[in-house]
Amino acid sequence: MIKKIINFFDKSEDRVRGQLSRYPILYTLVGGVAIVLFWRGVWHTADMLQAQGGILGFLFYEPVNMVIVIVILLATGLFVSYFIGDSILLSGAKSQKKLAEKTSKEVLEEETSLSEIKKVVIEIRKDVDEIKREVEEGK
């Protein structure tokens, strides 16, 4: 039963994402509104639970809640990746400089390297298209 529900939502998500990806501005608006309403609901639920008092009220008391949430975020690995971001972590691990710290020479070298990579990708695409044509003609 649970597998059917998960499968339904998985397939449904694929269809919705496929449709919305054709309209990026609409996709952004729908996603943005949904995210804001989700967090609004979380916020109001926490306020309601805090207002009830007792153990729930204590758990949702802001300083206590912040400690609990930091522990959960640290345990799941989301704390650092959310607040700093993967790209910053990766660039730091590779000892890369921020764009503002790079010299113009380094930026030009990087642009040249990217340009060369783009040329290679274009050549590969042409080769693949040529192979596809030959395969289709051979049928």
Image (cartoon, grey):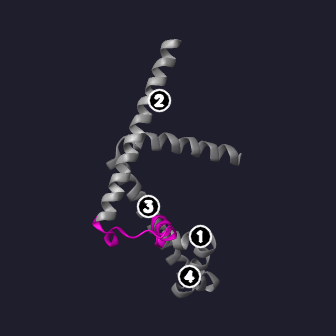
Within 10 angstroms of label 4, few (less than 14), some, or many (20 or more) residues?
A: some
Query: Which of the two labelled residues, at mark 2 and mark 3, occupies the earlier sequence position?
Result: 3
Residue at image mark 2 = 128
CA gap, disc 1 and disc 4: 18 Å
* Residue 103 vertical placement versus 54 (above, below): above
Can the viewer see residue 53 in this picture?
no
Cβ–Cβ under 8 Å for marks 2 and 3: no
Which one is nearer the viewer's eye here, 58 or 22?
Answer: 22
- Mark linked to residue 65: 4
Which one is nearer the viewer's eye here, 81 or 17?
Answer: 81
Kindly indicate the quadrant of the structure image that contains residue 55. Answer: bottom right
Within 10 angstroms of label 3, few (less than 14), some, or many (20 or more) residues?
A: few
Q: Nearer the viewer, mark 2 or mark 3?
A: 2
- Does residue 55 appear left or right of residue 66 in this picture? right
Residue type at the position of mark 1: Gly
Residue type at the position of mark 3: Ile
Residue at image mark 1 = 77
Query: Which of the two labelled residues, at mark 1 and mark 2, occupies the earlier sequence position?
Result: 1
Cβ–Cβ under 8 Å for marks 4 and 2: no
* Residue 57 vertical placement versus 44 (above, below): below
Residue 108, image x, y percentages: 30, 59
Residue type at the position of mark 2: Val
Residue at image mark 3 = 35
Is 100 covered by the magenta stretch?
yes
